[in-house]
Amino acid sequence: MQNNLSHVPDSQNAEGLVWGAFSGLMTGIAADADVAAVANLSDSPIVVQRIRIRWVTTTAFASAQCMAFRVNKVYGFTAVHTGGTPTAVQAHYNFQGGQKTTRAGVAIATGDRIPLTEISGVIAGTAAITTATYTAEDTDEPEVLAIGAGATLPTVWENWVPPGPPLILTKNTGLVVNLGIALGASGVGKLYVGVDGCRLG
């Protein structure tokens, strides 16, 4: 089916994968700035089954701070962010022993991660990440909005599952996470973003 409703995580044609990224000590980042991103650069579509977002404050804010993170699906994603000194993060397989295919003609070995040439992603160190190549997202229509209440020690804990047909990332399509509210008042914290899914074919 075109929307891949017939595919399930344990399908014989699917490779389970996890992309989990943990930021550096983020601080002083402007609203709408990108802080994490992952792109599918391979020909095999990715079915996103869950997006996990966590924020933990490590240095208290000077005044009450709300937290908000937006996740947008973007297109034309031919290169991930290189500006702002991000950390590159490799996705890994859910279950390597059950893989039935090779990747790029090479058998998958135990402990292998998915090459950055196939699934590429980054997360912020201390500052916003910049200079990505993708078609600008429509920031007023996010797929996910994860929020934390105003506090000097705000937290965010979000597990988002697509409510209807699966969220599909085809080639050169990806997810960008940005701030919905400026990260101000001198607070510091760490962001975790996890994408769980499977790759078809």
Image (tube, rainbow, N blue to C red):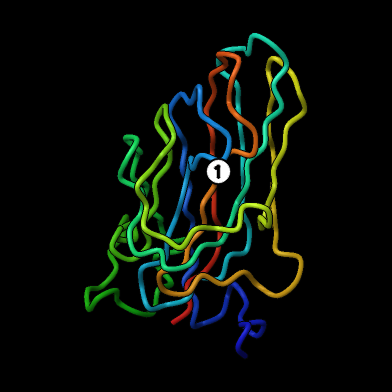
Give the answer, above or below, for where 37 lies relative to 123.
Answer: below
- Asked whether, in this view, residue 92 is left or right of residue 115, the answer is right
**Residue at x 57% of width, y 16% of height:** 187
- Asked whether, in this view, residue 158 is left or right of residue 114, the answer is right
Instruction: Quadrant for the N terminus, please.
Output: bottom right
**Residue at x 50% of width, y 22% of height:** 27
How far across and how far down the image is residue 127, in percent? 42, 29
Label 1: how many residues lie within 10 Å, few (<14), some (14-19) or many (20+)? many
Three-letter code, disc 1: Asn
> Is 15 or 25 nearer to us in this picture?
25
- Residue 38: image quadrant is bottom left
Residue denoted by label 1: 178
Give the answer, above or below, for where 22 lies relative to 168.
Answer: above
Secondary element at image label 1: strand
How far across and how far down the image is residue 126, in percent? 42, 26
- Give the farthest residue toward the bottom: 1
- Give the farthest residue toward the left: 106
- Asked whether, in this view, residue 46 is left or right of residue 154, the answer is left
- Residue 147: image quadrant is top right
Give the answer, above or below, for where 99 lies relative to 174.
Answer: below
- Asked whether, in this view, residue 7 is left or right of residue 110, the answer is right
How far across and how far down the image is residue 17, in percent? 47, 62
**Residue at x 40% of width, y 40% of height:** 129
Instruction: Quadrant for the C terminus, please.
Output: bottom left
**Residue at x 48% of width, y 26% of height:** 26
> Is 174 or 105 nearer to us in this picture?
174
How far across and how far down the image is residue 185, in percent? 60, 15
- Give the farthest residue toward the top: 62
